[in-house]
Image: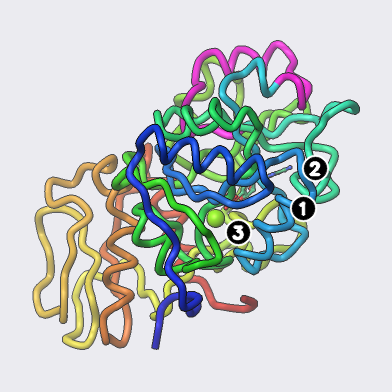
């Protein structure tokens, strides 16, 4: 059983960053094609955000339900201001935390050039300025805003290495820029600033403590995995089983069976698993976040009955890690 949907027979081209690689990637994007590239969070599947046909190509490659809105990436806040409406609060947040792993949901401008497919019919648009040097250079060379969801088949674990993109999308993406493993390893925090109350729609690398100095009071939505379905939710990362591995996932494991793989955390690890990977033997949440998806991919490829996951603290970055783990363990209603 393959944990990912079967890739097409032909392999995509994977290139390390070089002058020639950026030139080819930029030309592909300007021609309406797809390019996968690293950001500090996960690998993105990028397309010209101003082209309906190019953005439709993302949905096709990911097998993604059309109603899901996409994050559009920009070189800087000024470029984003051409497409969405910033108020003073949004400017303060952007000044404090961009470039970085934070997505802002803001009202779409009436004169925005972005494809309506990016906002999936909503009046708001999600925008981000990534910090990763490869993402930055690609955005500059392409000279386009790039719509870029995570570069994996819909509903699957997000890719934090070029090899994960190859395994999940195969030749559905012609070119992957290889920047090695992603430093953060978790998707961006999604902060809705389209209304008077700032709301975290998706927990991520930027925590509510990081946000309050610039955003003021911030609400956190109840995790969709607890809500149990996607009714009324605003985006794909909010669906309960959005990060599903192929194997069942068992949370809060304090012992482990011989036919299980163990995703461990911290210095005290139960013995007896078929295979154990430790997110952070010293118990550091930042290290654990960076390893999370890569280790899930590896354990999911093993012939075991289930993946057992040790408890991870819920403070700071732990909120985002536990959010992804709950989704990985959620019942697989629809995918
Ligand atoms: P992904 O592209 O896989 O990183 O997932 C996109 C995430 O962005 C979803 O989880 C949504 O929470 C969020 N998102 C994108 N666009 C919007 C929008 N217009 N309104 C609210 N949330 C959005
Ligand atoms: Mg995703």
Q: Which class describes the residues within 10 Å of circle 1: few (<14), some (14-19), or many (20+)? A: some
Query: In this rendering, does residue 277 appear at all?
Result: yes
Q: Where is residue 227 in the image (x, y as percent from the top left)?
A: 63, 62
Q: Dot 3, crowdedness within 10 Å: few (<14), some or many (≥20)?
A: many
Q: Depth check: give the residue in front, 56 or 227.
A: 56
Does residue 100 belong to the magenta stretch? yes
Mark 3, secondary structure of its residue: helix
Whole-angstrom CA distance, mark 1 to mark 3, is 31 Å
Q: In the picture provided, is 184 more to the left or to the right than 284?
A: right
User: Can you give x and y, in whole percent of width and height, for residue 317 in the image?
Assistant: 37, 40
Q: Are marks 2 and 3 in contact (CB under 8 Å)?
A: no
Residue 71 visible somewhere in the drawing: no
Residue in the picture at 32% in, 47% down: 289
**Which mark lies nearer to you, 2 or 1?**
1
Which circle's residue, 1 or 3, is located before the other in the chain?
1
Image coordinates of residue 86 in percent, x first then y, are 73, 18
Q: Where is residue 73 in the image (x, y as percent from the top left)?
A: 60, 34
The quadrant in which residue 157 appears is: bottom left
Is residue 236 positioned above or below 50 on the image? below
Q: In this view, does 332 lie to the left or right of 52?
A: left
Question: Is 79 colored magenta in this rendering?
Answer: no
The numbered disc on residue 224 is 3
Above or below, 269 relative to 47: below
Report how far apart the C-alphas of labels 2 and 1 lie in the structure: 9 Å
Tell me where the magenta segment starts and ends, as one range: 81-103
In what quadrant of the picture does the C terminus appear?
bottom right
Marks 2 and 3: which is nearer the front?
Answer: 2
* Residue identified by numbered label 1: 53
Q: Distance between the residues labelled 2 and 3?
A: 28 Å
Left or right: 166 in relation to 242: left
């Amino acid at each position: 059983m393959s944990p990912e949907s079967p890739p097409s027979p032909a392999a995509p081209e994977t290139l390390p960053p070089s002058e020639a690689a950026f030139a080819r990637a930029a030309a592909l994007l300007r021609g309406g094609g797809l390019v996968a590239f690293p950001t500090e969070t996960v690998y993105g599947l990028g397309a010209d955000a101003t082209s309906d046909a190019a953005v439709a190509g993302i949905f096709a490659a990911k097998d993604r339900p059309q109603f899901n809105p996409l994050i559009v990436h920009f070189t800087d806040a000024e470029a984003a201001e051409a497409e969405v409406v910033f108020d003073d609060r949004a400017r303060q947040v952007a000044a404090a935390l961009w470039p970085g792993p934070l997505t802002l949901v803001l009202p779409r401008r009436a004169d925005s050039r972005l494809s309506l497919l990016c906002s999936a019919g909503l009046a708001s648009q999600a925008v981000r300025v990534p910090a990763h040097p490869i993402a930055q250079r690609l955005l500059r060379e392409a000279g386009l805003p790039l719509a870029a969801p995570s570069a994996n088949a819909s509903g699957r674990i997000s890719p934090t290495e070029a090899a994960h993109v190859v395994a999940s999308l195969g030749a559905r993406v012609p070119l992957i820029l290889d920047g090695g493993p992603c430093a953060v390893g978790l998707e961006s925090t999604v902060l809705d600033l389209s209304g008077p109350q700032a709301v975290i729609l998706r927990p991520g690398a930027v925590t509510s403590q990081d946000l309050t100095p610039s955003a003021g009071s911030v609400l956190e939505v109840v995790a969709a995995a607890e809500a149990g379905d996607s009714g009324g939710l605003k985006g794909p990362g909010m669906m309960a089983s959005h990060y599903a591995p192929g194997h069942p996932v068992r949370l809060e494991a304090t012992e482990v069976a011989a036919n299980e793989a163990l995703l461990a955390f911290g210095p005290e690890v139960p013995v007896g698993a078929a295979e154990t990977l430790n997110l952070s033997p010293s118990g550091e949440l930042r290290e654990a976040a960076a390893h999370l998806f890569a280790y899930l991919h590896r354990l999911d490829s093993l012939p075991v009955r289930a993946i057992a996951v040790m408890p991870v603290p819920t403070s700071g970055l732990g909120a985002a890690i536990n959010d992804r783990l709950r989704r990985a363990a959620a019942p697989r209603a629809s995918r």
